Image: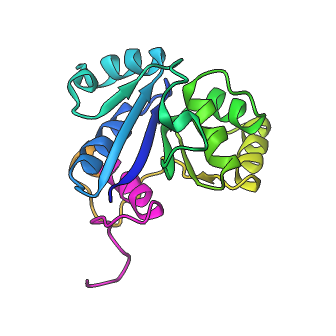
Amino acid sequence: MKRKIAIGITGASGSLYANVLLQKLQQIESVELAVVMSKNAEDVWQFELNNRDFEHSNVKRYGIHDYMAPFASGSSSFEALVICPCSMGTLGRIANGISDNLISRAADVMLKERRKLICVVRDTPYNLIHIQNMEKVTLAGGIICPASPSFYSLPKTLEDVAATVVDRVLNLLGLQSSMYRWNETE
């Protein structure tokens, strides 16, 4: 049986992270993906990556206000939601229980059902409100995974840099990844 994972993509800078995440997840046969993007996410993707490859992805896409999406309900079998990148606006809405679109609704579902919610926050620096919202989401059971790349693996390209964060997300999902492990030979 395939593991069902939803991906939310917001308008925060960092479309490369979402692109690398989608590419890696699509290579895992045991995963069924569903994607929802905000309008700002589409615009930022076009600006940052200079393409609209998200339109041609072979994963099921849902509109930002499509509350008929299966992962908008706790009765669905979706086990995780990764919001990558996660804007501070989206994080704030999640932290305060405001389900005004499919991404924040799906996050609410994951928290209330005690399923995995991973927010790949990209903004920097953080103000006190951001930190308090991260605390609220963490206390509610979510995982804050800042898009802070590592350089131990000596990445050669921007995609390699993004993969250091994405591999950590895959690890948090319990999926195999080629994640560099400090001072481990295998």
In the image, residue 57 sits, relative to residue 159, either above or below, namely: above
The image quadrant that residue 129 belongs to is top right
In the image, residue 81 sits, relative to residue 101, either above or below, namely: below
The image quadrant that residue 89 belongs to is top right
> Residue 38: x percent and y percent?
48, 20
- Give the residues drawn in magenta, as a range: 161-186
Residue 106 located within the stretch drawn in magenta: no
The image quadrant that residue 170 belongs to is bottom left
For residue 169, side relative to residue 22 (left or right) = right
Q: How many marks?
A: 0
State the residue in front, 7 or 49: 7
For residue 152, side relative to residue 101 (left or right) = left
State the residue in front, 90 or 13: 90
> Residue 150: x percent and y percent?
41, 59
> Residue 64: x percent and y percent?
50, 20
In the image, residue 56 sits, relative to residue 94, either above or below, namely: above
Quadrant of image for the N terminus:
bottom left
Q: At x 48% / y 29%, what residue is drawn?
A: 69
State the residue in front, 51 or 113: 113
Name of the residue lying farthest toward the front: 75
Q: What's the image's color scheme?
A: rainbow
Q: At x 38% / y 76%, what residue is drawn?
A: 182
For residue 160, side relative to residue 87 (left or right) = left
> Residue 71: x percent and y percent?
51, 38
Quadrant of image for the C terminus:
bottom left
Q: At x 31% / y 17%, what residue is drawn?
A: 46
Q: At x 66% / y 51%, what residue is drawn?
A: 113
